[in-house]
């Protein structure tokens, strides 16, 4: 397939008339490069390995031909809870967006679709699986939950699609993917989409794809030319004030802001709301209903600012998003490319602004080295810093790329615990009984935790991705004996 696709229209791609009608309703006439190259290869029925970064139109690049193929060859005896096409995505938001595209382009077809992910009640999904499902969009963890409960039958899958496969591997889903593939029919069409081609992706594709076609529309780790990038050098304590000024002074109506942590996202959203700017935070600790509501409000324009962490924002598909702000630079340079890829989509221009303090200069240099571009430094003359800023607790030093974010704190480094309780009175009845220590023996050294009763704290609810990332990861497609395991 030639790379020169500027003269191709959707009318040249031989898609079914109901699909063309839905495309026209959406206002599209010319496919993006990845669509122009991928759609004919998928329609031909072969496997596909596609290198496409976010914002290139890759979702329509596989949903349009899949809808055509399933409609052209209806199932002879369709079974309930047994999809013909399975689309795997790394995050809940991306799963919802993909299924929304399936509904948009397939609204004139008799095909039925379903989306499933964790973080919500499983019972409505079980009820939906009692009916016919042609296209299933799912995250790996919740999909395996259904397979384990025998509420889902994967024996009829004709087409398997792995969307953003690189991110699924980064999030630790390779073990789940292997289990899912083992439950699928041997004869099927496989499509793999990835923004990057690491050794892990190559190993995955070698074990999954059979003589695949290849499409690559953007060089790895490149940024869109339609995105205007800039850096504002500013102290960390002034960042929230500068962000409020930029939004209010420029009259921004839709801004996606990235923070490194969930707590930072919450604090920033609260600060913006206190400044009279409607904002909401989305991250893994938010309930799925809260994330869905915030995203819907952001898309429709009633919530001008959405503050997100990298995982929560992965796969967000927002038409003509004008502004992305890096409130803090990511520790991993590649994440910068994914972040600013939220804007400058499908031919629309956008701006990506990074607020950088002196401690982040090395991260900035790493990003510029990756994208092979020096990002312009810009000064905001209209911004007047506030005269009084409440003191903040000192921040720990930021980890460098490749270092662990947290380190173990020893008892010797922990500050002494203060207490307002009065000193313990003398016990006239003698020492208290302690089964672990006989009278006259020395008390064991305190190491920060009791040797007999560990300190318990309320653990945050892990997201579906974090729960599976914590599991030990086996080698990719390592050979294993065919042994049936008992329960």
Image: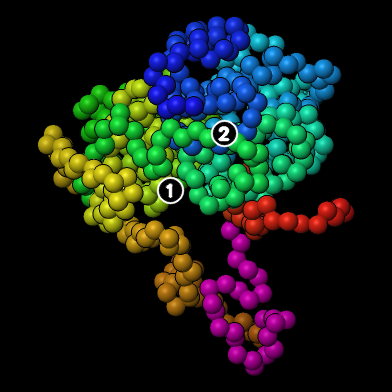
Query: Height in image: 389 above or below 153?
Result: below
Mark 1 — residue? 261
Front in this rendered view, residue 457 or 241 = 241
Mark 2 — residue? 213
Query: Height in image: 6 above or below 116?
Result: above
In three-dimensional space, the C-alpha distance between marks 2 and 1, rounded to whole angstroms, equals 39 Å
The quadrant holding residue 5 is: top left
Left or right, residue 486 beside residue 416 = right
Residue 53 is situated, as x and y percent measured from the top left of the image, at: 45, 35
Q: Residue at x 63, y 16 (%)?
A: 68
- Element assignment for label 2: strand
- Badges 2 and 1: C-beta atoms under 8 Å apart? no
Q: Residue at x 47, y 31 (%)?
A: 316
Q: Which class describes the residues within 10 Å of circle 2: few (<14), some (14-19), or many (20+)?
A: some
Left or right, residue 479 beside residue 486 = left
First to last magenta residue range: 432-458
């Amino acid at each position: 397939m030639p790379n020169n696709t500027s003269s191709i229209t959707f009318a040249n791609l031989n898609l079914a008339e109901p699909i063309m009608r839905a495309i026209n309703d959406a206002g599209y006439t010319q496919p993006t490069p990845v669509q122009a190259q991928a759609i004919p290869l998928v329609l031909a029925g072969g496997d596909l390995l596609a290198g496409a970064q976010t914002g290139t139109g890759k979702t329509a690049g596989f949903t349009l031909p899949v809808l055509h193929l399933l409609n052209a060859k209806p199932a002879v005896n369709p079974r309930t809870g047994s999809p013909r096409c399975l689309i795997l995505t790394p995050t809940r938001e991306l799963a919802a967006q993909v299924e929304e595209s399936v509904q948009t382009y397939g609204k004139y077809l008799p095909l039925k679709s379903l989306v499933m992910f964790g973080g919500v009640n499983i019972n409505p999904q079980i009820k939906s699986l009692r009916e016919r499902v042609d296209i299933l969009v799912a995250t790996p963890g919740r999909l395996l939950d259904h397979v384990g409960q025998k509420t889902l039958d994967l024996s009829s899958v004709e087409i398997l699609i792995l969307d953003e496969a690189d991110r699924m591997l980064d999030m630790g889903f390779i073990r789940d993917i292997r289990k899912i593939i083992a439950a699928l029919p041997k004869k099927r069409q496989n499509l793999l989409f990835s923004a990057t081609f690491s050794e892990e992706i190559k190993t995955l594709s070698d074990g999954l794809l059979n003589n695949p076609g290849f499409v690559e529309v953007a060089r790895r780790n490149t940024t869109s030319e339609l995105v205007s990038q800039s850096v504002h050098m500013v102290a960390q304590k002034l960042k929230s004030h500068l962000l409020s000024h930029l939004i209010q002074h420029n009259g921004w109506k839709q801004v996606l802001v990235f923070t490194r942590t969930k707590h930072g996202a919450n604090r920033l959203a609260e600060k913006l709301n206190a400044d009279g700017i409607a904002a909401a935070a989305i991250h893994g600790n938010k309930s799925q209903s809260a994330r869905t509501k915030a995203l819907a409000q952001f898309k429709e324009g009633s919530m001008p600012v959405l503050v997100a962490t990298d995982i929560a924002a992965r796969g967000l598909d927002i038409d003509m998003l004008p502004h992305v702000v890096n409130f803090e630079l990511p520790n991993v340079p590649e994440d910068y490319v994914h972040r600013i890829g939220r804007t400058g989509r499908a031919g629309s221009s956008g701006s990506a602004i990074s607020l950088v303090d002196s401690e982040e200069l090395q991260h900035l240099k790493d990003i510029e080295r990756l994208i092979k571009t020096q990002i312009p430094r810009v000064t905001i003359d209209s911004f007047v810093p506030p005269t009084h800023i409440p003191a903040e607790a000192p921040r720990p030093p930021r980890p460098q790329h490749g270092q662990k974010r947290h380190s173990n704190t020893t008892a010797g480094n922990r500050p002494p615990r203060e207490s307002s309780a009065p000193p313990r009175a003398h016990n006239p009845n003698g020492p208290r009984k302690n089964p672990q220590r006989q009278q006259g023996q020395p008390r064991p050294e305190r190491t920060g935790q009791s040797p007999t009763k560990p300190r318990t704290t309320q653990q945050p609810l892990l997201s579906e991705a974090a729960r599976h990332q914590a599991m030990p990861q086996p080698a990719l497609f390592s050979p294993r004996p065919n042994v049936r395991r008992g329960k």
